[in-house]
Image: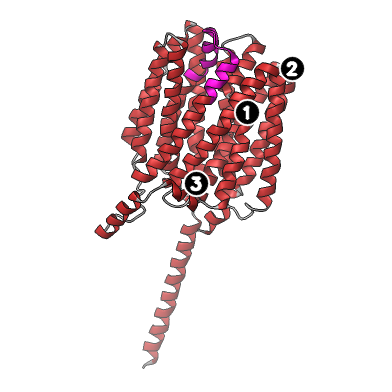
Amino acid sequence: MSKQESSNEILMEQQDGKTLDMASSDNFANQNEKPRIPSDVIFVGIAMALMNVSYVMCYTYTGPYLQSIGITISKTGMLMGFCALVSQFTKLLSGFLSDLYRRRKNIVILGYIISLLSRTMFAFSKTAGYFSMGQIFDRFGNGTSATPRDTIVSDIAPKKIIGSCFGLKRSLAYIGSVVGGILALTIMHKTQNYKTVFISSTIPAILAILLLAIFVKEPNTQLENTNTSQQNNQNKKNKKRFRFSKLNQFGKEFWIVISINFIYMSAKISETALILHLNKIEMSVTFGAIVMILINIGAMLAAYSSGKIGDKTRRTNLIIISLAFFLCSYLTLRYASTQALRCVSIILWGMHMATSQNAFVSLVSEYSPKGLKGTGMGVLWLSTGMAEYFGDHFIGGYIHQKYGANSMFFVGGSICVICLIFTICVNKTVLSKNAYNKTIAS
């Protein structure tokens, strides 16, 4: 071999080495490049915002309207608790069905249509029974749409920014809630008619259904096994074998997160009970709309930022932060003597809602086995409903009416402290190696 040929080979090897180095550096850069939030997440968030506009317009005046037709605070609390329970049972069922049939978008649209029908029931109700039936329909529709909607986001969100995706969706939803509160306040101020508010709420609900149907694509949840006939046959067998016994596939960490969620939500009274309490102090029906606006402003401020924080640290820390917001809100509500302090407590209430929801939904998404995310979300919402029924019925209803608002805040705050102690204990032991570490590793 001549010297010239050997020198050419050396030069080619050096060039190949440089090419490999450049390729590896490009791959490294791609791995470290932060993924973008998918457009479908944004469209899901906008549709959720429109539904929240509709929901808050009705929800703001549900309590005052029921009282105006002779329903007591205790019975209102029982109704709200029962409706929450219906909603959460439906969320479990819709999550199970979305895992079974892999058609999450269609189930969301069905839920939105049921919620739209409930708005017309509110508008044309003439008795408390008919209105209560509309409330149950509303919660049934909410339960049908909520789990597959969250699971759509879980399916399409990049793992590294799943908290940010859920946070953005919820931020958009809370913006819709603020707008809904403002619209409800404006319409009520001009018309002084509950029915006008209720019938106006159908418009954003219709827009939400159209947006979801046209712009959101059904995520590919067939687990990359639809290419061959053999794999299709395996899919059919898996569907036939799908049973609730598959809950055994959920690990210990998943059930601990569900337990924390149950204790946490047991401390929470419904926003209806909160509005009735504050309306009594302020002696103003329209103050209920201001409460909903402030709650959702607080939630809007915390939703996206808490999601980003959760992507960078352990999500269980978010639960501890949200419990701090929760306790501060209860303490301020208990001892507030001015309207300004009560407004601060309401904003803190919204911040605890957004932070806790983001943390629990993200943790459940990460701890759920592949192919069972919808079921996992359903279990989360079922535990939430059972806990909220206790909070609404016992704390917001019985304790409030028999012993007064101060006792209601004391009992709720005490449960918050119990939940905080339990969360700190498992955060340092069982959940020390949590889903955040698993996500980054993958």
Camera-side residue: 239 or 158? Answer: 239
Quarter of the picture containing the N terminus is bottom left
Of labels 3 and 2, the one closer to you: 3
Task: Using the numbered discs, state the Cα–Cα distance from disc 3 to disc 2 in whole angstroms.
Answer: 41 Å
Spatial separation of the CA atoms under disc 2 and disc 1: 17 Å
Disc 1 secondary structure class? helix
Earlier sequence position, callout 2 versus callout 1: 2
Residue to which mark 3 is pinned:
365
Nearer the observer, 359 or 13: 359
Q: Amino acid at mark 3?
A: Ser
Q: Residue at x 36, y 48 (%)?
A: 221
Say which residue label 1 marks: 349
Sequence order check: which comes first, mark 3 or mark 1? Answer: 1
Q: What range of the chain is rendered magenta?
A: 58-81
Question: Looking at the image, is 111 positioned above or below residue 404?
Answer: below
Which residue in the protein does label 2 denote? 337
Q: Is residue 381 above or below residue 100?
A: above
Residue in the image at 53% along x and 59% along y: 441
**Between 190 and 359, which is closer to the camera in this rendering?**
359
